[in-house]
Amino acid sequence: MEAKLKLYLETSVWNFYYVEDSPEKRAVTRHCFDSQLYQQFDLHISETVLEEIKKATAEKQTQLFQLIDRYQPTLLSSNAKVRELAKAYLDHQVLPMKSHYDAQHIAFATVYELEVILSWNLKHIANLHRQQRVQTINRLYGYTNPLQMITLLEVSHYE
């Protein structure tokens, strides 16, 4: 049996399951979750995802935590390597300083050797230019596994 591809689901993926102002992305997100994502892939989140969710309203927190409970992704714990790499992304201006959560998401996926980050954050994560800059820093820090930073459209069979 072939090993499942390991995906990191950044906070925006969970948020778009319920988003009201982007019905197309919500439809793709729901389709992925409801039809294939958890069956075809090995899903992961981090403490950073939970931390960001805790900043939402109580109602939104409840929705998102129930969604996470339903799909049971593996929870990744922070460590010195994750913190060091996230800081490197900021120090080397791969991401703007205010994007420390985004840097943490990418660092988690890199340090834990996941293959893909799924995100609807086109500015800071699912972005070819950003992906190239991340790979440069990753190599500098000894991480050689390629990391794809993509949207759900690239893993979806949505039509």
Image (cartoon, rainbow, N blue to C red):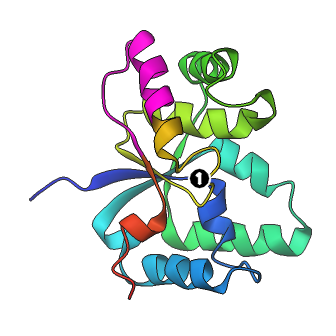
Quadrant showing the N terminus:
bottom left
Which residue in the rendered view is the most extreme toward the right?
57
Residue stretch in magenta: 132-148
Name the residue rendered at 82%, 72% in the picture. Answer: 60
Relative to 32, does residue 78 appear above or below in the rendering? above
Q: Is residue 145 magenta?
A: yes
Residue where numbered disc 1 is placed: 10
Horizontal and vertical percent position of residue 135: 42, 27
Horizontal and vertical percent position of residue 17: 63, 77
Quadrant of res 90: top right
Name the residue rendered at 18%, 53% in the picture. Answer: 3
Which residue in the rendered view is the most extreme toward the front?
129
Q: Is residue 141 magenta?
A: yes
Q: Nearer the viewer, residue 118 or 47?
A: 118
Q: Is residue 51 visible?
A: yes
Horizontal and vertical percent position of residue 124: 63, 44
Count up the numbered dots.
1
Quadrant showing the C terminus:
bottom left
The local crowd at label 1, few if under 14, some if 14 to 19, many if 20 or more residues have their Cα within 10 Å, is many
Name the residue rendered at 50%, 63% in the picture. Answer: 72
Q: Secondary structure at mark 1?
A: loop
Horizontal and vertical percent position of residue 112: 42, 33
Q: Nearer the viewer, residue 133 or 66?
A: 133
Q: Is residue 111 visible?
A: no
Position of residue 20 in the picture relative to residue 89 (left or right) = right
Say which amino acid is labelled 1. Answer: Glu
Quadrant of res 145: top left
Relative to 84, does residue 22 appear above or below in the rendering? below
Name the residue rendered at 52%, 51% in the picture. Answer: 126
Q: Nearer the viewer, residue 74 or 56?
A: 56
Position of residue 128 in the picture relative to residue 79 (left or right) = left
